[in-house]
Image (spheres, rainbow, N blue to C red):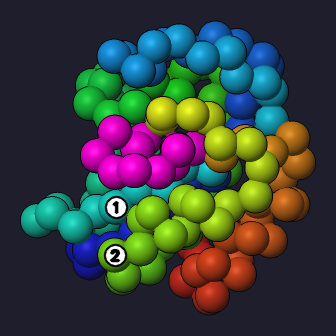
Amino acid sequence: MDQGTYTLLLELETTTSITFGAAGTRRLDAGYYAYTGSALGPGGLSRVDRHRKVCDGTNMTRQWHIDYLLGAAETTWVGFWSAAVARECDYAETLPGTAIEGIGASDCACESHLSYSSTRDRLVNELEAIYNGFSRD
C-alpha cells in the first residue's frame, strides 16, 4: 500500500477519561475527534487497517497514543482520509477544533495531532478541503 499521511475521524459517544500510555490521562468530551498520522514506513497506509482493527476490537495492541482512544468501548470509527504526501504536521495543525495537548505529537514540535469538535460537519468539511479529493471511508 502507498505511503503518506492520513487522518482518522472518530466519534466518542460519551464523555470519558482515557489513559494514553505514558502521555497520561485526559478527560475527553463526547463528540468527534480527528487524528492525523503518517505512514511512511514499509507497511505504508496499511497502518490505517491496523487502526481500524484496534477500533473494532480485533487487535488489542496499544502501540501509539491513538490506540488508547481507538480501543475505548465508547469510540466509533467514522472514516478516514489519506494522501500520498508527507504532510502530517501541516494537516494536523490545520484542523479546526480543540487540540488535545501532547497526543500523537511525541516525535515533533506540534501541540497535538488529535483535534476535537462537538460537531461532525466542521471536521469533515475541513478534511475534504485539506485532502482535496483524496477522501475514503
Count of marks placed on residues: 2
Q: Which residue is mark 2?
A: 86
| Image coords of residue 12 (percent x, y) | 72, 30
Q: Which residue is mark 1?
A: 38
For residue 59, what is the image quadrant?
top left
Tell me the kind of residue under disc 2. Ala
Is disc 2 placed on a helix, strand or loop?
A: loop
Quadrant occupied by the C terminus: bottom right
| Image coords of residue 75 (percent x, y) | 63, 29
| Residue reaching furthest to the front | 109
The stretch of residues the image draws in magenta is 104-114
| Residue reaching furthest to the bottom | 133
The reply to whether callout 1 and callout 2 are in contact (CB within 8 Å) is yes
* Magenta stretch secondary structure, dominant: loop
Camera-side residue of 101 and 26 = 101
Is disc 1 placed on a helix, strand or loop?
A: strand
